[in-house]
Image (cartoon, rainbow, N blue to C red):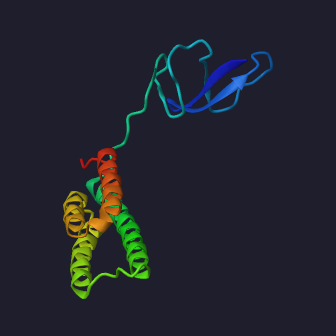
Amino acid sequence: MKKIAMIQDGIVQNIALWDGISSWNPPGYTLVDITNSNQFIDLYYLYDGTNFSAPIPTPISLSEQAQQYIAFGTQIFNQIQESVWATNEAAAAAGNPLSIQQLTSLLTESDTLQKALESGSLTTSIYIISQLVATFPQYTTIGTNATNQISSFIAANPLA
């Protein structure tokens, strides 16, 4: 079997296996035998008629990045809110409900966190989470998980 790169307009559109015997010439494609190539070649790689090269990633706009940060922040806030609610319910069921003062403080901090996360201010959110955990140590696991997710997202999606 031969490994064939199917190229259209200088871009690898498909990689097919061909027996090398039967007649095969799909219209609109340039076929290049890559069976013995030592180079990694994949879909969307570029072909200049002689050499293959990895595609150049298309940068996304700052506006698109902001939308990604906002969507992620909203998702994280919803996760935090559900986890905090479950923790509070479990504490109340065990006879250890939050006091009115603690609830008021939690609501104030949560509102600040929500505004930061839903506006895409992820680095600020990490700081707010650390303050929340310092005030409410029972949320340390929730805060640590959220901070790790936010840090991973920021590392994988740095702002341009």
State which quadrant residue 135 falls in: bottom left
Numbered circles on residues, count: 0
| Picture layout, residue 146 above or below residue 44 | below
Q: Can you name the residue that lies furthest to the right here?
A: 22
Task: Report the quarter where the N terminus lies.
Answer: top right
The one nearer the camera, 69 or 4, is 69
Q: Can you name the residue that lies furthest to the bottom here?
A: 100
Residue 118 location, x and y as percent?
Answer: 30, 69
Going 36% across and 68% down the picture, which residue do you hit?
80
The one nearer the camera, 34 or 83, is 83
Going 44% across and 81% down the picture, which residue do you hit?
93
Judge from the rendering whether residue 130 lies leftward or rightward of residue 21; answer left or right: left
Q: Can you name the residue that lies furthest to the front here?
A: 95
Judge from the rendering whether residue 108 lies leftward or rightward of residue 80; answer left or right: left
| Picture layout, residue 124 above or below residue 98 | above
State which quadrant residue 98 falls in: bottom left
Going 38% across and 34% down the picture, which residue do you hit?
56
Residue 66 location, x and y as percent?
Answer: 29, 59
Residue 47 location, x and y as percent?
Answer: 48, 24
Residue 18 location, x and y as percent?
Answer: 73, 22
